[in-house]
Amino acid sequence: MRIPLPARWGAFMLPLLAAFTFAAAARAEPPIVAAGAGYKRPVTELAQAFEARSGFKLEASFGNMAQVLALAAQSTRVALILGDQAFLDAAPLLKGARLVPVGEGRLVLAWAKAAPAPAKAEALAEPAYARIALPDPTHAVYGKAATEFLQRSGLAPALKPRLMTVATVPQVSAYLVSGDVDAGFINLTDALGIRERIGGWLVVDAALYSPVHIVAAVVPGHEGDAEIQAFEAFLATPEAQALLRRHGL
């Protein structure tokens, strides 16, 4: 015996069917690995190498860490965040998150091609370095590291009128390449990426700023994702480790 459906059944089911279709489509999209903008090059290469090896696809997103965390709060697709452990440990969104060590970050002082090569970072006090850029210390770990260096080295008072704060490490790099600043604080990873387009760089004394431990934090709720578990395993492989070392980590 065929039981007729109520006349309004279709009107009831259509929204549910649409919601199911939308959810299925969302699940079909690759998870997002978000990272500080200063790590765009290694993370992009890691994602490409991982896809070639595993067949899993990851989407990458970059910005300062405040932007990265804001994206993670808005989108459930953000499954893993790569950045400074101290910053990630303080993020409520990542409370109890599983952490995967990636490497140690290094602060460098870089200079434009037209600028003289300083013998040491303290040479910034010389008049030749009239414009000095650093990332925003509130949201970028290397801006914080640069600020600590300036304070601990005693250079902060003299250099304050010459400092220009921008949002991210790549923005400092862009100003160095264009020659709009004489010198700037970036990470070793970005310096390696632009080495042909700047005058050079020197590694800042690590004793004059807090250690930068770079980790990958698995966003709670994504611990069981097949792609993320596979990517965590990939990070420990010789291939991934060699890639990270090549990028100064």
Image (cartoon, rainbow, N blue to C red):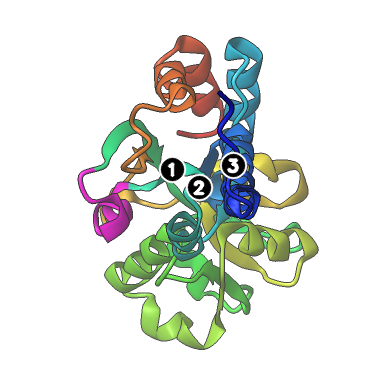
Which of the two labelled residues, at mark 3 and mark 2, occupies the earlier sequence position? Answer: 3
Which of the two labelled residues, at mark 1 and mark 3, occupies the earlier sequence position? Answer: 3
How many residues crowd around disc 1 within 10 Å: few (fewer than 14), some, or many (20 or more)?
Answer: many
Residue matched to label 3: 5
**Labels 1 & 2 near each other (Cβ < 8 A):** yes
Which of the two labelled residues, at mark 1 and mark 2, occupies the earlier sequence position? Answer: 2
Residue matched to label 1: 82
Residue matched to label 2: 35
Of circles 1 and 3, which is in front?
3
Residue 155 position in % (x across, y down): 38, 75
Q: Which region is colored magenta? A: 85-96
Which residue occupies 47% across, 48% down? Answer: 76
Majority secondary structure in the magenta region: helix
* Relative to 243, 232 lies left or right: left
Residue 134 position in % (x across, y down): 52, 68
Callout 1, which amino acid? Leu
Nearest to the observer: residue 216 or residue 169:
216
Which residue occupies 29% across, 36% down? Answer: 99
